[in-house]
Image (cartoon, helix red, strand yellow):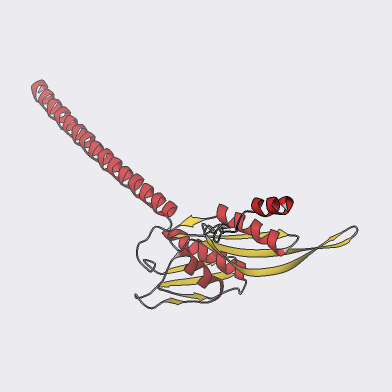
Amino acid sequence: MNKKEDSTTTKTPFKKGSFKRKKREKPEFDQKVIDVARVTRVVKGGKRFSFRTVVIIGDKKGKVGVGVSKGKDMRIATEKSYADAKKNLITLSFSGNTIPYRVDQKLGSAKILLKPAVKGNGIVAGGAVRTVVSLAGVKDISAKMLGSKSKLNNARATIEALKQFSVKKTREIILESEEKSKREAEQVKNTGKEEKNIKKTDETKEVKKKDDVKKTEKEK
């Protein structure tokens, strides 16, 4: 009896809520696989199969990137392409729901047309262009694919088009404009100095002529 009593007393009662599930942390970027292809490589022993995936990532707040990579299975390929997209991220600098002006972009055989749209119009686009624009955070835009139907080429062309509104590009434009204004100011200064030098030379020539005329008069 004592043994039974001891065994019952040592047991701890189960409490509700003692096991708490860990909350899943939200990923930094949303991702979408737009293309999956089965790739074969011929070697001496035969054929080796792998997968190639194209992934677009973005935070819907101005950051977006495209990545492509290969792997033995889908999971490895998507992880690698996610890392590649993270390396090639661009940050957009414009404010508002749409792009500032129209852009025509060509990359290889892909041609992309991006147009600004009125508020509430939504994203009027399809395929890879739609996913890139939506993950970038643009809410009102109209776009069209005019060239190749390759998803990877169209995604990269869209990224190149959006690079015109990126922070890096705007900095380059600002620096170029500052350098241009400095050059123009230097040119104005140089032209002013040249004009002064020309005036001085003209004055000296006139003085010399007068002196020569006086000398000739005295000699006479």
Q: Nearer the viewer, residue 115 or 127?
A: 127
Residue 213 position, x and y percent, is 12, 28
Quick check: 88 left or right of 183? right
Quick check: 76 left or right of 33? right
Q: Residue at x 52, y 59 (%)?
A: 26
Residue that protrudes farthest toward the right in the picture: 45
Residue 27 position, x and y percent, is 53, 58
Q: Residue at x 14, y 29 (%)?
A: 207
Q: How many marks can you see?
A: 0
Residue that protrudes farthest toward the front in the picture: 1
Q: Residue at x 53, y 57 (%)?
A: 25
Residue 115's image quarter?
Answer: bottom left
Position of the C terminus, as image quadrant, is top left
Residue 166 position, x and y percent, is 43, 57
Q: Nearer the viewer, residue 44 or 33?
A: 33
Residue 154 position, x and y percent, is 57, 69
Q: In the rendered view, would you say 53 is above or below 115?
A: above
Q: Residue at x 48, y 72 (%)?
A: 113
Residue 156's image quarter?
Answer: bottom right
Q: Nearer the viewer, residue 104 or 170?
A: 170
Q: In the rendered view, would you say 171 is above or below 15?
A: above
Quick check: 65 left or right of 39? left
